[in-house]
């Protein structure tokens, strides 16, 4: 670990299998093998933008666990993964049912990642960080994962380290009612919140637009709330002021992972000390890049590539 500021992320990363061509998975003759996980996606995004990142998690003592560790480490991320010899590494499968529609299925019940424990968390590592980033996926995995989530957040707060929280609702992991209760408990404890508009409604109830949603969440305590609106850009409520950012016009190929890329872009500029406008500008760019490439994180840009999507000329010479 260098002495430069670093961000700690914590959560489950799974092996990822995806069909190579559109169509029913039952008729796919080949599948690609990779990895994917919200928090490691953010870590890789930060790393590519020049911000040192640490990913903490738990993997199985199997080939897929070794794949997860190797791929994340290959991106320059500092990997702190406990190895669980009694549980498998989780798996997700992406089916490209049509060129524009995908279905994602998870095989993560009882996975190593769902068994992450407070003992897997290095308090000193968190205490020295510029930021801790977590998501609502982790507390949805299991009671033990939820306890670990709370432990990590408490460690950050005790050390005065800002906490970033992406609601990241997964209906296949828990009910809307259970998620709503958890969000209302977590949000007052964190400093930065990311949510889609529908996710925000789980936390605060009925709202008419993104600005109202951001304001309602901010009233619960966080100084920064960002509502991700996909092709409609984003709205942020930062220290009582509203900021808006349009999305970049693109022809999206694969939107899975775009939200994580957005978060990485925003947090990278936050750690670098840039203002809300620059954070949002970078965030919509990083989100757009990921939409143009198959895969959850492979299309994440490096800092010297951020200008590409704003260029008028398609070829750089």
Image (tube, helix red, strand yellow):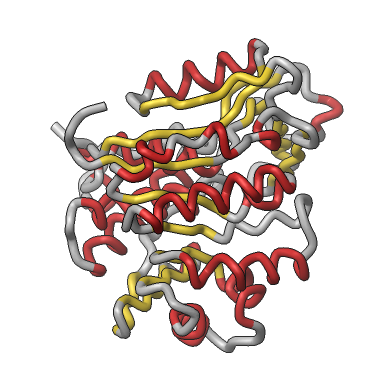
Front in this rendered view, residue 273 or 16: 273
Residue at point 13%, 32% (across, down):
317
Residue 5, position as x, y percentages in the image: 22, 42
The residue furthest top is 63
Residue 276 versus residue 24 in the image, above or below: below
Front in this rendered view, residue 269 or 289: 269
The quadrant of the image that shows the N terminus is: top left
- Side of 38 where 20 appears, left or right: right
Front in this rendered view, residue 309 or 63: 63
Residue 113, position as x, y percentages in the image: 65, 33
- Side of 84 where 5 appears, left or right: left
Examine the rendering and report whether any part of residue 211 can be seen: yes
Residue at point 66%, 73% (across, down):
202
Examine the rendering and report whether any part of residue 266 can be seen: no
The residue furthest left is 317
- Side of 140 where 152 appears, left or right: left
Residue 95, position as x, y percentages in the image: 73, 36
Residue at point 34%, 50% (across, down):
131
Residue 133, position as x, y percentages in the image: 43, 50
Residue at point 50%, 72% (across, down):
188
Asked which quadrant contains residue 3, the reply is top left
């Amino acid at each position: 670990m260098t002495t430069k500021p670093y961000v700690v992320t914590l959560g489950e990363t799974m092996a990822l299998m995806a069909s190579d061509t559109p169509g029913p998975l039952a008729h796919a003759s080949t599948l690609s093998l990779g990895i994917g996980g919200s928090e490691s996606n953010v870590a890789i995004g930060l790393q590519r933008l020049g911000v040192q990142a640490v990913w903490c998690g738990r993997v199985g003592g199997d080939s897929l666990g070794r794949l997860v560790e190797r791929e994340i480490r290959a991106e320059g991320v500092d990997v702190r993964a406990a190895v669980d010899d009694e549980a498998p590494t989780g798996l997700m499968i992406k089916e490209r049912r049509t060129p524009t529609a995908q279905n994602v299925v998870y095989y993560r019940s009882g996975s190593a990642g769902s068994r992450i424990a407070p003992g897997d968390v290095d308090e000193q590592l968190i205490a020295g960080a510029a930021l801790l980033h977590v998501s609502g996926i982790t507390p949805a995995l299991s009671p033990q994962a939820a306890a670990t989530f709370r432990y990590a957040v408490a460690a950050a707060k005790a050390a005065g380290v800002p906490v970033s929280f992406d609601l990241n609702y997964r209906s296949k992991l828990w009910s809307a009612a259970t998620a709503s209760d958890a969000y209302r408990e977590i949000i007052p404890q964190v400093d930065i919140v990311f949510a889609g508009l529908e996710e925000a409604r789980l936390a605060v109830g009925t709202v008419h637009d993104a600005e109202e949603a951001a304001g309602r969440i901010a009233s619960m305590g966080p100084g920064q709330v960002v509502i991700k609106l996909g092709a409609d850009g984003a709205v942020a409520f930062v220290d009582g002021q509203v900021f808006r950012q349009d999305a970049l016009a693109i022809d999206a190929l694969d939107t899975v992972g775009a939200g994580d890329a957005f978060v990485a872009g925003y947090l990278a500029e936050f750690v670098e000390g840039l203002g809300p406008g620059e954070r949002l500008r970078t965030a919509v760019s990083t989100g757009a890049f990921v939409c143009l490439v198959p895969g959850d994180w492979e299309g994440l840009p490096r800092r010297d590539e951020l200008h590409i999507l704003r260029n008028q000329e398609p070829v750089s010479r």
